[in-house]
Image (spheres, rainbow, N blue to C red):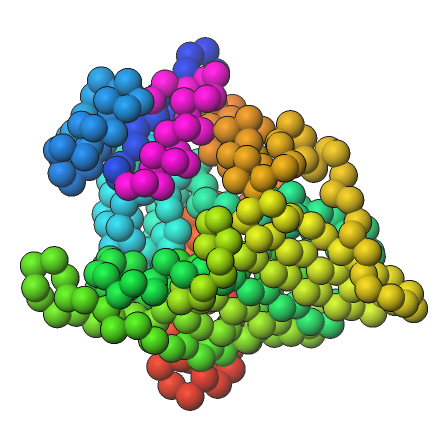
């Protein structure tokens, strides 16, 4: 196994292959890898030759493949990024582990809890260093909320409300993300996985979970004309944390927000000693407001500390987002550094495949609850 504690990959660049040719691979993974001083982007693999070839040409990558089995070659790769459809994550990742490769796997990591747990178990057996990209934990607003909690500003937490509003599902076009066979669920998995991870990162383990979901948009058939089970485009998850605090995690892909990127994030946290609000309009506003118990008036803006911003730009949210991952080398860079050192160290509630499997379990419970009457289900692992 390359990059284990006994065999760190520290004497040469890490050879990383990218599976998947979507806009996300182009905008997140390839820029982050290209800007890392200790990475060689060894190849790109996609289902269709032309998109794979075009993406490789954009990033000056010589090796292009449309055959996954051929691509997962430990003679040419040390690690892979699996940015393909959800239903393909498990077979690709398991093969990669069997061939001694480290894996960054997109979320949701699988379409079932059983598959996700098998992946996490195999990673532990092989010593593979893994990461699941829960991107929003790295944004300065959420990093500062976490620090305020750790510093005791909120005291005993009472309730957390998080809202993720976006509008990419409003057009009704076919998307594999709303095809239950390929994705497992709709926004519950796609957006809800982010919020479940961040909520647990902030307040601890979830012990009960209920969910109500809706499908507002009539979605087109698959490109080949075949029918499929269409999944939800809006959902509200209700959670109870081990501490006794409660939370509402709302995710929707049918919201018209009218912002540059068409999405907004909102967070409200109340506790015995204080209140914290965070708002990100994905345009120019990314702020945290806080009010201590007993204070009056609207909650004032509390400046995010310089060490959290780091070298990231602060004017436009997209510039911050780019810099967090391309300049500060968070997330992808953390994984690269962990593989090269042979030690998986990501801090509290590390976002590895074990965490991906736990989130998958919660997603499955949310789907089960939504399919019933929305009642709270036992979510203890």
Does the segment drawn in magenta span residue 154? no
Indicate the position of residue 173 as horizontal and vertical percent values. 23, 61
Q: Provide the residue span drawn in magenta.
A: 22-42
**For the point 46% across and 77% down, which residue is it?**
211
87 lies left or right of 277: left
> Residue 248: which quarter of the image?
bottom right
Does the segment drawn in magenta span residue 33? yes
Q: Nearer the viewer, residue 156 or 341?
A: 156
Q: Is residue 322 above or below residue 234?
A: above
Q: Is residue 64 above or below residue 37?
A: below
Indicate the position of residue 237 as horizontal and vertical percent values. 50, 73
> Residue 360: which quarter of the image?
bottom left
Specify the quadrant that holds the N terminus.
Answer: top left
Q: Is residue 221 above or below residue 143?
A: below
24 lies left or right of 135: left
**For the point 87% across and 62% down, which residue is it?**
292
> Residue 298: which quarter of the image?
bottom right
2 lies left or right of 90: right
Q: Is residue 163 visible?
A: yes
**For the point 49% across and 78% down, which residue is it?**
210
Q: Is residue 343 above or below residue 122?
A: above
Q: Nearer the viewer, residue 310 or 89?
A: 310
Q: Is residue 194 visible?
A: no
Q: Nearer the viewer, residue 11 or 171?
A: 171
**For the point 7% across and 59% down, which residue is it?**
224
Residue at the top extreme of this rendering: 11
Indicate the position of residue 316 as horizontal and vertical percent values. 58, 39
Q: How many marks overall?
A: 0
Residue at the bottom extreme of this rendering: 373
């Amino acid at each position: 196994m390359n990059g284990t504690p006994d065999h760190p990959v520290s004497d040469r660049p890490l050879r990383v292959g990218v599976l998947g040719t979507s806009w996300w691979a182009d905008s997140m993974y390839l820029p982050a890898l290209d800007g890392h001083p200790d990475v060689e982007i060894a190849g790109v693999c996609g289902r269709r030759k032309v998109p794979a070839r075009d993406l490789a040409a954009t990033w000056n990558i010589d090796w292009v493949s449309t055959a996954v089995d051929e691509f997962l070659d430990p003679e040419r790769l040390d690690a892979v990024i699996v940015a393909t459809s959800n239903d393909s994550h498990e077979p690709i990742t398991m093969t990669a582990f069997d061939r001694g490769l480290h894996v960054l796997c997109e979320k949701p990591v699988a379409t079932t809890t059983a598959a996700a747990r098998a992946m996490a178990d195999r990673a532990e057996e092989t010593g593979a260093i893994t990461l699941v990209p829960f991107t929003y934990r790295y944004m300065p607003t959420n990093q500062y909320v976490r620090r305020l909690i750790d510093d005791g500003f909120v005291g005993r937490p009472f309730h957390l409300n998080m809202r993720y509003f976006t509008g990419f599902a409003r057009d009704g076009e076919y998307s594999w993300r709303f095809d239950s066979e390929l994705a497992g669920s709709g926004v519950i998995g796609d957006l809800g996985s982010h919020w479940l991870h961040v909520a647990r990162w902030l307040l601890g383990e979830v012990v009960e979970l209920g969910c109500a979901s809706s499908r507002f948009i009539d979605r087109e058939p698959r490109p080949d004309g075949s029918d499929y089970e269409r999944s939800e485009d809006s959902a509200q998850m209700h959670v109870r944390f081990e501490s006794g605090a409660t939370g509402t995690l709302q995710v929707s892909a049918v919201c018209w927000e009218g912002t540059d990127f068409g999405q907004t994030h909102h967070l409200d946290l109340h506790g015995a000693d204080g209140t914290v609000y965070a708002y990100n309009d994905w345009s120019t506003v990314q702020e945290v407001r806080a009010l201590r118990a007993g204070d009056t008036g609207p909650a004032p803006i509390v400046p995010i500390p310089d060490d959290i911003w780091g070298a990231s730009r602060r004017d436009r949210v997209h510039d911050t987002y780019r810099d967090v991952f391309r300049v500060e080398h968070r997330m992808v860079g953390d994984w690269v550094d962990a593989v090269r050192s042979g030690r998986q160290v990501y801090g509290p509630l590390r976002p590895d495949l074990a965490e991906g499997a736990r989130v998958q379990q919660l997603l499955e419970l949310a789907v089960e609850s939504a399919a019933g009457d929305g009642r709270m289900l036992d979510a203890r692992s």
